[in-house]
Amino acid sequence: MKTLSKFLIFLSAVFSCCACSGKPPKPPVFFPFAIENKGAKVETVIRIPKTAYYDFYLKFMFDNHHEGDRDRVKRLVGNSITKDGKLIEDPENPGVPLLLKLTVVKIENQKEILIFDHITNQHPESAYGAEHYNKDISKVYLNAGSYRVKLESLRSAQELKGTKIDFSIAKWWVK
């Protein structure tokens, strides 16, 4: 019992130190985003551990246990892409139009260097899972270091109200 107590105290100290390290999170990271509101923003600082392409995307969640919710969210998401990146347009279901501005700034020696600043309205579905659809925003090549990332909704999209949507950043896994 004494050994278990010492071990638990040790773990507590380790986790406390990690929580206080002050380092920004590294991908994959997910941030709730109220995209339905024009002017809604997510701004964060992230740490890129390895030089690579990073995927910036929206994750649209649905309730797989609620009949029809997957179809409802798919109608909101709309167009998709093939595995080789070609857009598959669905004139019957183009999805909710979005207008987003993504800005990525490198933080280096207490200076900020603009790396990526782009406004886009093309966001095809790029992946799906058991309880979500992903819509691409962009892929950006980033060197190791710290970055300030900001995503802003430039158009109201009230049809999305009530749908849980995360702004996500992850290393792009290509072979």
Image: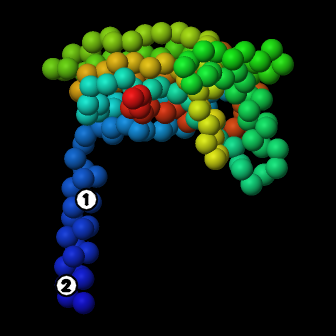
Q: Is residue 112 visible?
A: yes
Which residue position holds label 2?
Answer: 3
What's the distance in space between the residues labelled 2 and 1, CA to CA? Answer: 20 Å
The percent coordinates of residue 157 (x first, y second) are: 71, 22
Residue at point 39%, 12% (across, down)? 116
Q: Which quarter of the image is occupied by the C terminus?
A: top left
Answer few, some or many: residues within 10 Å of disc 2's Cα (few below 14, many 20 plus, some between 14 and 19).
Answer: few
Q: How is the image coloured?
A: rainbow
Q: Is residue 82 above or below residue 134?
A: above
Q: Callout 1: helix, strand or loop? A: helix
Which percent across, then down, holds residue 150? Answer: 44, 22
Residue 126 location, quadrant = top right
Residue 13 location (% of width, % of height): 21, 64
Above or below, 95 relative to 64 = above
The residue sitting at 25% across, 34% down in the picture is: 49
Kindly identify the amino acid type of the residue bearing the numbered disc 1: Ser
Query: What's the mark number on residue 16?
Result: 1
**How far across and how far down the image is residue 135, in percent?**
60, 26
| Residue drawn where x is 24% and y is 68% of the image | 11
Q: Is residue 129 left or right of residue 109?
A: right
